[in-house]
Image: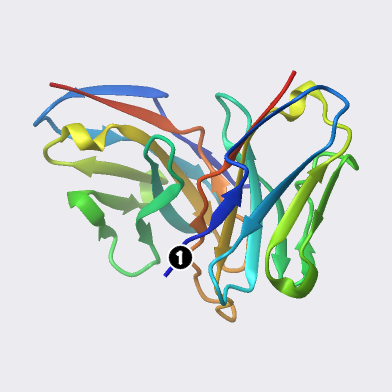
Amino acid sequence: EAGVTQFPSHSVIEKGQTVTLRCDPISGHDNLYWYRRVMGKEIKFLLHFVKESKQDESGMPNNRFLAERTGGTYSTLKVQPAELEDSGVYFCASSQLTGGSLETQYFGPGTRLLVL
Amino acid sequence: AQSVTQLGSHVSVSEGALVLLRCNYSSSVPPYLFWYVQYPNQGLQLLLKYTSAATLVKGINDFEAEFKKSETSFHLTKPSAHMSDAAEYFCAVSYPGNQFYFGTGTSLTVIP
């Protein structure tokens, strides 16, 4: 079974440009999460989709970040325009709906974004 | 608010020595607890999880962790370090249906 995949693995862009990150969750996983790790700090939650709906987007830093999950399959996270502080590793995770019991989140390898 | 503290951003051990990576959480209600490992250029991989059953949890590659409510701790141990254990380790807490809260990570170096 394929795991969570993310594309691209690395991205280097200039301040003011736009970047779009993609995440393909494990097939059948309705929960999809985005996290970000700024260098040297903890991995922080950005948002949570249940199927195509945003369940919780409390972690999104500002309105330069836009996440979508059309059709409830893959998700994209767009940063427009990118700023220096957006640099970091963006992780995607997915899990099955468990009806309130414990879920295990499966993580992708991350996209390393560097804004110059 | 929940938080997770991992003491020691870098830990070095000799091959064959005991591995001890510390994790403390702050929560009024015991959460679910996880340890993840990230090998170079790979994603986060689940090592083990605590789900309020047994307090001593065994995971992959001979890692284990013990939940101690009185100390609000969930330290990760392995009796004998291997070179292949060199990686970054993350402790995380969660409640069902909710986001994960991660610690800052501990980078483990194994010295031959």
Q: Is residue B100 above or below residue A49?
A: above
Front residue of A68 and A41: A68
Q: Position of residue B102 (x, y in %)?
A: 53, 43
Amino acid type, mark 1: Ala
Relative placement, left or right, of B78 versus B90 is left
Residue B79 figure quarter? top left
Front residue of A83 and B31: A83
Relative placement, left or right, of B107 versus A44 is left
Q: Is residue A61 above or below residue A55?
A: above
Q: Position of residue B27 (x, y in %)?
A: 55, 50
The residue indicated by pointer 1 is A2
Q: Chain of mark 1?
A: A
Q: Name the secondary structure under disc 1.
A: loop
Front residue of B79 and A38: A38
Indicate the colouring scheme.
rainbow
Q: Residues within 10 Å of mark 1 (few under 14, many from 20)?
A: few
Would residue A76 be visible to someone looking at this image? Answer: yes
Q: Residue at x 47, y 61 (%)?
A: A3
Q: Residue at x 52, y 59 (%)?
A: A4
Would residue A51 be visible to someone looking at this image? Answer: no
Q: Position of residue A38 (x, y in %)?
A: 63, 29
Residue B73 figure quarter? top left
**Direction bottom: furthest residue:** A99
Q: Residue at x 29, y 60 (%)?
A: B55
**Direction left: furthest residue:** B16
Residue A17 figure quarter? top right
